Amino acid sequence: MKLCSFVVPCYNEEEAIPFYYEEMQKYITKLEGLEFEFVFIDDGSKDKTLEVIQGLRKKDDRVHYVSFSRNFGKEAGLYAGLQKAKGDYVVTMDVDLQDPPFMLEEMYSYIKSGEYDCVATRRVSRKGEPPIRSFFARKFYKIINKMSDADIVDGARDYRFMSRKMVDAILSMKEYNRFSKGIFGWVGFKTKWLEFENVERVAGETKWSFFKLFLYAIDGIVAFSTVPLVFAAVTGLAFCIVAFIMVVVIVARALMFGDRVAGWPSLACIIVFTSGIQMLGIGTIGIYLDKTYMETKDRPIYITRLEE
Ligand code: UDP
Ligand code: MG
């Protein structure tokens, strides 16, 4: 029998965990030929989350947990959970039932066929979410996809059914600043996308304020794109070219018509040229920083899907 691990990060979720656990029992019986384990991560919760999980563990030894010394964030939680999970398959999902368990059966059918390494989900509506939040979320996905080569899908949830191969690939990315949505895309593998309508959380409330989401978006861009670093070099180069054209035009004009505002043409050229040189200098540092930054991440150079 193959083992399937559910990795569930929890932060102040004392109310949601029992619902989640009960609901899951209904659906896992439909996944034939699998054994299960639950890996809960208590991400430094301040309520009774840990006690609730320990309660479950007492009556069900398929329940495991990792409890953090403080709140490290969902990304750290997912990483810890993936490390702890022993399954041949691993499912990452939220505890608030916003990742509908009824989809597990369909997800498993794709994985079982062996054709896919991962089944991922995205929600196609953002019902129940403030419109301004949806607006910025959409813009964010547009921007980050232009700027990086990790394929980040709009509306993608961290609700995934993965094979061991994919999990190991994710664990091989040991970077500290973890942006899972990017990491999932970066490691590649054959992924089947399923869509669903947004579901509101069963209990408790969201941990994401608009500001937190904004910072998260910046984290995502910084983790997966070095375009901002290289931007200065490009601007600097553009400035230098403009300065050069200015010099030619202004000198020619001064020669033909005389220097009408004494000193202005040379001054203007000097300003544009020096700022161009400075930008180019900063940009050059940026390009090297980009390389050093990518090296320090120590990402795998390639990830094999199959070999014989
Ligand atoms: N979560 C976590 N650590 C945090 C914040 C959230 O482990 O610092 C967990 C949370 O318990 C939930 C999941 O991450 O299982 C998603 O959080 P939430 O439902 O608040 O996010 P949303 O669904 O609103 O995007
Ligand atoms: Mg949620």
Image (tube, rainbow, N blue to C red):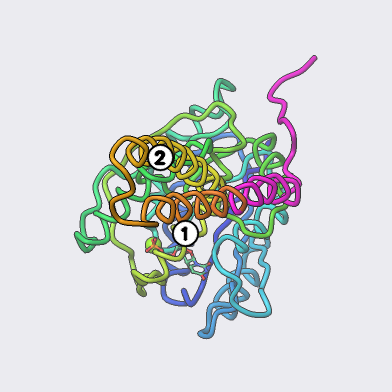
x and y, in percent, of residue 21 in the image:
48, 62
In the displayed structure, does residue 260 sit left or right of residue 188?
left
Report whether residue 10 is seen: yes
Mark 2 secondary-structure assignment: helix
Is 266 drawn above or below residue 251 in the view shown? below
Name the kind of residue labelled 1 in the image: Ile
> On residue 251, which mark appears?
2
Pair 1/2: label in front: 2
Mark 1 surroundings within 10 Å by alpha-carbon count, few (fewer than 14), some (14 through 19), many (20 or more): few
Residue at 32% x, 38% y is 253
Residue at 61% x, 44% y is 90
x and y, in percent, of residue 225 in the image:
54, 46
Q: Is residue 298 magenta?
A: yes
- Residue indicated by mark 1: 218
Residue at 28% x, 51% y is 260
Residue projecting furthest to the top? 308
Query: Range of the magenta residues?
Result: 282-308
Mark 2 surroundings within 10 Å by alpha-carbon count, few (fewer than 14), some (14 through 19), many (20 or more): some
In depth, the one of 120 and 58 nearer the eye is 120
> On residue 106, which mark appears?
none
Is 38 drawn above or below residue 149 in the view shown? below
N-terminal label among 1 and 2: 1
